[in-house]
């Protein structure tokens, strides 16, 4: 067997051996790292981090200004138990939200935050006229864009953002911004709600150190890997 063939086989097998799934939701399995709030142009010096909902609006309220939602899952990357190792390959990541108000709207975009913010203290004014998707406050390109005009559960694909964080970007969460110019109001349950809190599900593969064995050990290493795979599947 050639080294190239062995390397390809080992990579294929390791994708099964090192694949994992983790879920993060406030109060479940000891997780206490969800941060969420919204900032409101109409009440520019008010903080809403203790509320049970997150508002996203273009004219809030009644044409007087914007409302932008903020959400972050802290401590999801690291070397500890129930954490994703930096350098992992993110095969899929899904954010699940419970929508409680959804006026007809065109779309909402989630932008990866670049500036720091706090659930307990951030306001429209403290973030300097809200969050600008200008490459300074947040990325200028959205990590996800979706339409939501129905109440209930919505699942949002945010794989690209999780991969960026795994690659070393700082995890400062997302800002939610309504794209349309209509009088839209979109609300989802926050982590302070008693039920249906924001949920993050991540499927990933741990980083594997490169293996360059001696030619004489190629067959033994491959055989051992395959046997371990089969024993795990019984």
Image (spheres, helix red, strand yellow):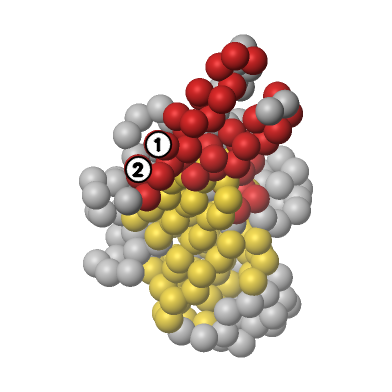
Q: Is residue 181 left or right of residue 65?
A: right
Query: Is residue 16 among the parts visible in the rendering?
Result: yes
Q: Residues within 10 Å of mark 2 (few under 14, many from 20)?
A: few
Q: Residues within 10 Å of mark 1 (few under 14, many from 20)?
A: few
Please give the name of the residue rendered at 51% of the width and 60% of the height, measured from the top-left corner.
Answer: 94
213 and 91: which one is in front? Answer: 213
Q: What percent of the width, then of the height, locates residue 231? A: 35, 43
Instruction: Answer above or below: position of 166 versus 188.
Output: above
Please give the name of the residue rendered at 63% of the width and 41% of the height, measured from the top-left corner.
Answer: 164
| Total numbered labels | 2
Q: Is residue 234 left or right of residue 163?
A: left
Instruction: Answer above or below: position of 199 versus 162.
Output: below
Quarter of the picture holding the N terminus: top right
Please give the name of the residue rendered at 34% of the width and 64% of the height, measured from the top-left corner.
Answer: 197
Does the residue at mark 2 contact the one at mark 1 (Cβ under 8 Å)?
Answer: yes
For label 2, the SS is: helix
139 and 168: which one is in front? Answer: 168
- Disc 2/disc 1 C-alpha distance (Å): 5 Å
- Provide the residue designation for mark 1: 228
Q: What percent of the width, then of the height, locates residue 20? A: 43, 45
Q: What percent of the width, then of the height, locates residue 50? A: 32, 57
Instruction: Answer above or below: position of 116 versus 1.
Output: below
194 and 166: which one is in front? Answer: 166
Q: Is residue 43 left or right of residue 30?
A: right
Q: Is residue 37 left or right of residue 29?
A: right
- Provide the residue designation for mark 2: 231
The numbered dot on residue 195 is: none
Please give the name of the residue rendered at 75% of the width and 53% of the height, measured from the top-left corner.
Answer: 141
Q: Quadrant of residue 47?
A: bottom left
For label 1, the SS is: helix
């Amino acid at each position: 067997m050639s080294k190239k063939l062995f390397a390809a086989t080992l990579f294929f097998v390791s994708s099964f051996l090192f694949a994992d799934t983790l879920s993060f939701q406030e109060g479940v399995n000891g997780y206490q790292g969800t941060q969420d709030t919204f900032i409101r142009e109409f009440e520019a010096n008010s903080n809403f981090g203790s509320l049970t909902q997150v508002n996203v609006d273009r004219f809030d309220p009644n044409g007087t200004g914007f409302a932008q939602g903020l959400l972050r899952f802290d401590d999801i990357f690291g070397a500890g138990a129930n954490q994703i190792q930096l350098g992992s390959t993110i095969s899929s990541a899904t954010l699940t939200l419970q929508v409680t108000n959804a006026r007809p709207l065109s779309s909402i975009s989630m932008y990866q935050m670049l500036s720091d913010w706090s659930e307990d203290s951030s306001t429209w004014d403290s973030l300097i006229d809200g969050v600008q998707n200008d490459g300074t406050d947040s990325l200028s390109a959205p990590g996800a864009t979706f339409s939501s005009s129905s109440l209930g559960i919505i699942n949002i694909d945010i794989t690209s953002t999780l991969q960026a964080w795994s690659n070393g970007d700082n995890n400062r969460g997302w800002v939610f911004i309504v794209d349309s110019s209509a009088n839209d109001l979109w609300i989802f349950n926050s982590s302070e709600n008693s039920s249906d809190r924001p949920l993050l599900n991540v499927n990933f593969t741990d980083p594997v150190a490169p293996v360059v064995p001696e030619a004489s050990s190629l067959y033994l290493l491959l055989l051992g890997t395959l046997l371990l795979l089969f024993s795990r599947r019984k």
